[in-house]
Image (cartoon, rainbow, N blue to C red):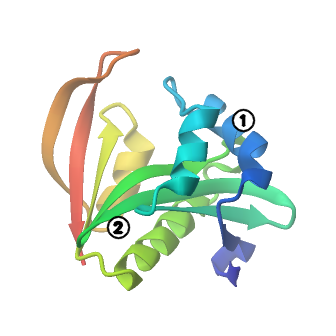
């Protein structure tokens, strides 16, 4: 575990927190990851997921797949009641530091075109738009904006 700004403590994802993660996941995404998908992340040697805790409460989580020197960001999620407090930035910065320390030269992600707060955060953190995937999110038929950050 490691301490960071705003009182958050980070630890690697474990099954103990799966029910809390699934709750936040379901309130955050129209196409949430399933129980099985999160369990697979625990056995994927390229997967790194961290939990952000404030005391005993799960504030959010973030993860990526490290493939060669690229971190493909899979999730950056903050629980609804903790949003708009700067936690998203702290969680994202922590995850990017971990990716860099593990040898990533760049980080890539997809974000819903309509997710203005997330896109603004990624802009502030130095991500740039590199493309768009039309109708990428099947359930809502939303476009994905592809972004990249070089370290």
Which residue is drawn at the image coordinates 40% and 15% (left, top)? 139
Q: Residues within 10 Å of mark 1 (few under 14, many from 20)?
A: few
Q: Name the residue: 59% across, 35% down.
A: 36
Frontmost of labels 1 and 2 is: 1
Front residue of 35 and 60:
35
**Residue at (67, 71) in percent of width and height:** 11
Cα–Cα gap, marks 1 and 2: 27 Å
Q: Which residue is mark 2?
A: 125
Q: In this rendering, would 36 be left or right of 117?
A: right
Name, please, the residue furthest toward the right: 56
* In the displayed structure image, the side of residue 37 where residue 132 appears, left or right: left
Going from N to C along the chain, the mark reached first, 1 or 2, is: 1
Describe the element under mark 2 as helix, strand or loop. Answer: loop
Give the quadrant of the C terminus.
bottom left
Tell me residue 123's x, y (percent).
30, 59
The residue sitting at 47% across, 55% down in the picture is 44
| Residue 41: percent from left, percent from top | 52, 51
Residue furthest out toward the left: 131
Check residue 23 in the rendering and tell me which mark sits there, or answer none.
1
Residue 5 coordinates in the image, percent (x, y) = 64, 79
Describe residue 10's horizontal placement relative to residue 63 as left or right.
right
Q: Between 67 and 115, which is closer to the camera in this rendering?
A: 67
Vertical position of residue 107 compared to residue 20: above or below: below
Q: Is residue 24 above or below residue 30?
A: below
User: Judging from the image, what secondary structure is the residue with disc 1 in?
Assistant: helix
Q: Quadrant for residue 133, please give it.
A: top left
């Amino acid at each position: 575990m490691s301490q960071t700004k705003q009182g958050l403590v980070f630890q690697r994802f474990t099954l103990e927190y799966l029910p809390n993660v699934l709750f936040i996941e379901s309130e955050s995404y129209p196409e949430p990851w399933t129980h099985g998908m999160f369990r697979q992340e625990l056995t994927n040697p390229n997967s790194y997921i961290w939990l952000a805790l404030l005391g005993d409460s799960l504030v959010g989580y973030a993860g990526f797949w490290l493939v060669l020197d690229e971190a493909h960001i899979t999730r950056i999620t903050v629980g609804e009641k903790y949003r708009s407090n700067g936690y998203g930035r702290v969680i994202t910065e922590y995850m990017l530091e971990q990716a860099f320390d593990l040898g990533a030269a760049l980080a890539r992600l997809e974000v819903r075109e309509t997710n203005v707060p997330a896109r603004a955060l990624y802009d502030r953190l130095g991500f740039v738009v590199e493309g768009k995937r039309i109708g990428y999110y099947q359930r809502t038929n939303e476009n994905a904006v592809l972004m990249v950050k070089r370290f």
